[in-house]
Structures are given as structure tokens and as C-alpha cells.
Image: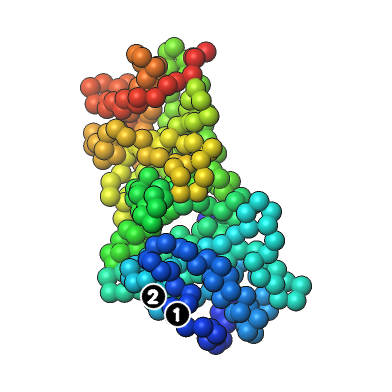
Amino acid sequence: MVTMKWDVAQKWITAPKDRAYYSQKPADSRSNSSRYIELLRYSVNKTNVDLAKYDLFVLVFAGRGAEESRNNLDLWSWAFWPVDGSGPLATLGTYAIRAFALVPEIAGIGYSLNGVYAHEIGHILGWKAGYQGLVNLYLCKGNETVPAIDDWSPYDEGSWLGFPRGSMPVEAEAWSRIRMGWLTTQNVSLTALGQSVVLQPLEQSTGTRVARLQLRDERYLLIELRRKVGFDTALPAEGVIVTVIDETKENCKGIVRLYEPQLEPYETLRHISNKDLGVHILILPYFQGNVLIRISSSDIGSYLDLMLLVLLQVDYPTFS
């Protein structure tokens, strides 16, 4: 859990140029990032807040965000942090702002700001924790975005869940939690007889909540169990999901991909009565370089006839 304390500036600041100057044209192009930095620098020098008291800075702009309104005259919500040791984004006296989020004041009918705020502020929290931000997991193709992990992360489609849309953003998936230091993995070394692990729901605070299997190349698999509880109540389903991680890729380029084909997550829990006890995962080598993952209740001691199979068409390492 992250605890934040904040203050709000006591007055609005009128930008020196009109909205069209700062907005994205065409919509989704994100071509005017330098103008957002202009807006930040102007605002910093006009504020009456003692910025030296704070670690992060959030700039709220009037109106709706273009990501929701689809109006290319609206500003697009965005997060900025230094890359490769670059200097501060803005300074005020001796104080330097190195990361900030830009978010809208209001949302349209049928939408909530919760998901946008969670998504953008999460980016700069990741930078503050000592990482290069919590990155976007969706795929960027030109001016379009394509889901890579769907509704299972707030850094993909999961920031838009709930009704109104965006009112119940999901919790971070396993990879982002590991990156923040909130979660440790149980490494699985594939053997001829396989290896088993009991996974607890990712939403819990204790127990083994993610298993990692290193592949033959630099990629690895993460296996996690998700439940429709707490902040994850709006998930489309609950069950075991498998993601393929490739950390050689960059932001928006498919670092985390939901492995497909795999069973619908709902199917992996359909026959399991006591889901709060977690699930028993058995990982086995299979024919032609595949991996077989068997899923059952953690309290029955055997797989019986209720086991469900997920066949992964990926290479596994030479087993020990």
C-alpha cells in the first residue's frame, strides 16, 4: 500500500496561451510534449506552494482529458520523468521538479477520473521508487494503442474498469509490483518430474503470489492468480493468468504480454470451491519444447479429474 500526503494550490493559474496551443493535434499524436513542459514551468513560477516540501508534482488542467473526450482540442493526460539521467523538467530557486503528472479536472458523463489519476500518478511513483517509471504496457502502433495485457493492469485497459468507466481501476499486475519492490517471486526450475507451487491470490498481502519460469532466451513467464476482491472487484473474470515478460523491450513495445492462447481465467477456477486457499500449480515439461501447467485446488492433495490444462507453446530451458 502507498500512503500519500498532498496539498492543493489555493488558486487557478491562467496559462499564457490558449488551449489549442497546448493540446494534441491530431488527437492521440502526443506531438506537443515540449509544450506541456512549457506549461509546467510557467505554473511552477506562478504557484504559491512551497514545492520543496514535496516529492512529486501533479498539474491539474481545466476541462476533460483527450484520452476520454477524443477531442483534439483537449489536453492529453500524461506523466513525465527523467530518462537516462537527464536534468530536471523545471526549477524554482534551488528546487527541481524531476517528475510530474498532468491530469484533467473533470470527466465526461459516464466516466470517472479514478483510473486516469491512478495510471498517471502510478507512472511517477514508479520513478520516485528508483525505477524508470511504471511503464505503459499497451502496445503503441502509430497513433493507436493495442492492448497487451487487457484489463489485468492499470497500465493497460484495466484503468477503465467500473461504472462509470474508470471508477474501479484494477490493482497492478505482478510484473509492475515486482518492479516496485512490492512483491517477490518464487522461481521455478523445470525438472523432468515438474515443480509445484501453491499460489495465493495476488490481492493478498502474504504467501506466494507469483511464480516465475525462465525461458531459454531472455524472456520469462509470470504466473499469477487474480480474484474479484477489493480494488480488483471490477475484473472481468478471476483465475490464473500467464504473462510473457521481455525486458529488452521498451515502454509501449510489449514488455508484458498476456500469453495467448490460454484458458479463459474464469475456467481455471470454475471447479475450485475454496478459492481463498489459493491454487496448486504443477509445471511440467511437455513434448516438442512446450510447457504444461496443471491447475487444481490447493487443498485436495491430487489433481483428480478436475484439473485444467494450459498448454504454452514456448520453449523451456534444459531441465535439471
Distance between the alpha carbons at the discs numbered 1 and 2: 7 Å
Q: Is residue 109 visible?
A: yes
Q: Residue furthest right?
A: 94
Which residue is rendered at x = 53% and y = 29% of the image?
A: 218
Please say if 291 is above or below 177.
above
Badge 1 vs badge 2, beta-carbon distance below 8 Å: yes
Q: Position of residue 139 (x, y in %)?
A: 40, 48
Q: Amino acid at mark 2?
A: Leu
Please say if 15 is above or below 82.
below
Which residue is rendered at x = 34% and y = 72% of the image?
A: 71
CA neighbours of label 1 inside 10 A, class few (<14), some (14 to 19), many (20+): some
How is the model colour-coded?
rainbow
- Left/right placement of residue 33 relative to residue 243 reads right
Q: Position of residue 245 (x, y in %)?
A: 47, 36
Instruction: Give the secondary structure at mark 2.
Output: loop
Q: Position of residue 255 (x, y in %)?
A: 47, 41
Please say if 297 is above or below 216.
below
- Residue for badge 2: 73
Residue 226 disc label = none
Q: Position of residue 12 (x, y in %)?
A: 52, 86
Q: Amino acid at mark 1?
A: Arg
- Viewer-proximal residue among 216 and 164: 216
- Residue for badge 1: 19
Where is residue 162, by image quadrant? Answer: bottom left
Please say if 226 is above or below 17.
above
Where is residue 87, by image quadrant? Answer: bottom right
- Left/right placement of residue 236 relative to residue 18 reads left
